[in-house]
Image (cartoon, rainbow, N blue to C red):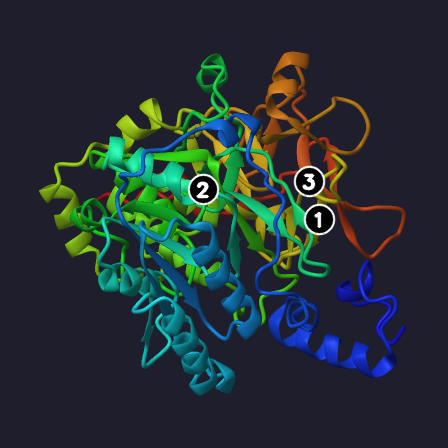
Amino acid sequence: MQFPDSPLFQIWGKGLMEDQQIVAQKLFDKYGYNVYLSDRLPLERPLKDTRPPRCREKKYSHDLPTLSVVLIFFNEATSILLRAITSVINRTPSHLLKEIILIDDFSSNEELKGPLEEHIKKFNDKHPGLLKIVRHQERKGLTEARISGWRASLADVVAILDAHIEVNTNWAEPILSRIKEDHTVIISPVFDNIRFDDFQLTQYAEAADGFDWALWCLYEPIPKDWFALKDQTAPIRSPSIMGILAANREFLGKIGVLDGGMHIYGGENVELGLRAWQCGGSVEVLPCARIAHLERAHKPYVQDVSLAVKRNALRVAEVWMDDYKHMVYYAWNVPLENSGIDYGDVSSRKELRKRLNCKSFDWYIKNVYPNLVPQVNIVGYGTMKNMLSKENCIDQGPVPGNTPILYACHGYTPQHMFYHSTGEFFVGGLQSRRNRVDRCLTDPGEGKLPVIEKCDKAQRKGLHMHWDFTQGSSVINRKTKRCLEIAKDHGSPYYMLAMQNCTGQKWFIQNTVKQWGKQPKGGG
């Protein structure tokens, strides 16, 4: 085996010759999935029907809204794109499928130029006028590509999909039927997973789509009232959208499609979910609509997306989250004032919100997404340094594990601290969700080391989790009266965190809220 450590060859490729392995690895490096295999699989390949059994019995009206399918790509492998097109044609009733619109976000691969036009011509010879292609003249990013797809669409309903997908059996009818019942609902299909190496299908369980306070997407448990219906085919109420979506074309336009001010990738789906709910619509996941999504082992064309996601998250917070927007700033460890991040002009989005008479984020969190828990008592957040060793920060330490450490400052999530006016210190990322508990700094009362415990457990056990701290002062446990300090152990040149009798060491936390920790201005 030429590449024993490559993710590509852990399961797949045992019988390949050396020269074939080299070709396969080169393609894998370029695309992040197994193009060597994809090029050898039929475009019309069977997919396991992953729908719940009741979905297979369900009958739909012949008279449903028409559908535009948008496939967005940037330097996708040709066989992947052609298989997506083929699956849409084969698994969507022809009288409902008005068009397939390909959006090319300025690909550089030559095979996606002239050769792709030839493939489109062949499809259109069989299905006159079905395929259209829109080519961007510069790289615009995912959000603008989706807007281009919506703009080019003409059918009653538009489904905006990635190009590395295969739709499953009868995927479209549940979507079109539900939107016919209620034109204000945005639909998220259920994703299944196509493995990047052997292209086998892994069935995923149904879930609602949500997000954390940094606005990263995540799956949420299905609401209890859905199970009470005892109907596997019923829509699942969802706080957000995972990315792929279908909507009534006119309604999506009325509520502002997507925010074209978003950069590159990330946050645009959360923004749409908030806007749908706050502005008179809703979001649902449909268990009977299944789409298989090809995972990538790595994203070859996207560098670190976190900068774009951070910027986009602040943009969403400023437009839609009202008095809760500070939670996004806390989660990203960004100063509330003078953040130094240009999230662009949001005036037109604020105007849209006003024009549509949208509800508040407070309404959304109470009525749609009560699992999000706002923190109202945070007064200091970010990295935390001791004046004796300014290059080191408090760090949550190895996970699993519950011993915080002193570590060279890097400023990422494991070093984020959140101090509350009520005395708690959260350590590590901000969870603040009903089903994900934050971790609190505690003094066990004996021994030299501080301990991190889940805050609810610390409270239940009566652990010493409350601290007195002001900016530039000692960190004193209210119960034990011991201080969190740093000390050198047994002649070691390195400082460690220690619980000990207070010696007046001074700590500083990176960001403060409002006037907390600021020196009062001297008066005359």
Give the residue at mark 3: 485
Indicate which label's residue lies in the foreground, 1 or 3: 1
Residue 406 tag number: 1
Q: Which residue is rendered at x = 41% and y = 75% of the image?
A: 120
Q: Nearer the viewer, residue 67 or 342?
A: 67
Question: Relative to 275, does residue 444 appear above or below in the rendering?
Answer: above
Q: Nearer the viewer, residue 91 or 351?
A: 91
Three-letter amino acid code of the residue under disc 1: Leu
Give how far apart the Cα atoms at labels 1 and 3 are. Answer: 10 Å
* Quarter of the view holding residue 70: bottom left
The answer to whether residue 482 is seen in the rendering is yes
Give the residue at mark 2: 189
Three-letter amino acid code of the residue under disc 2: Pro
Mark 2 or mark 1, which is nearer the start of the sequence? 2
Q: Which residue is rendered at x = 56% and y = 30% of the image?
A: 52
Residue that lies at the very extreme toward the front in this rendered image: 126
* Quarter of the view holding residue 480: top right
Q: Helix, strand or loop at disc 2?
A: strand
Q: Which residue is rendered at x = 27% and y = 58% of the image?
A: 150
Q: Are marks 1 and 3 in contact (CB under 8 Å)?
A: no
Give how far apart the Cα atoms at labels 3 and 2 are. Answer: 52 Å
Residue that lies at the very extreme toward the left in this rendered image: 355
x%, y% of residue 385? 59, 50
Indicate which label's residue lies in the foreground, 1 or 2: 2
Q: Nearer the viewer, residue 195 or 405?
A: 195
Give how far apart the Cα atoms at labels 1 and 2 are. Answer: 45 Å
Indicate which label's residue lies in the foreground, 3 or 2: 2
* Quarter of the view holding residue 322: top left
Task: Quadrant for the N terminus, please.
Answer: bottom right
Q: Are marks 1 and 2 in contact (CB under 8 Å)?
A: no
Question: Relative to 323, does residue 467 appear above or below in the rendering?
Answer: above
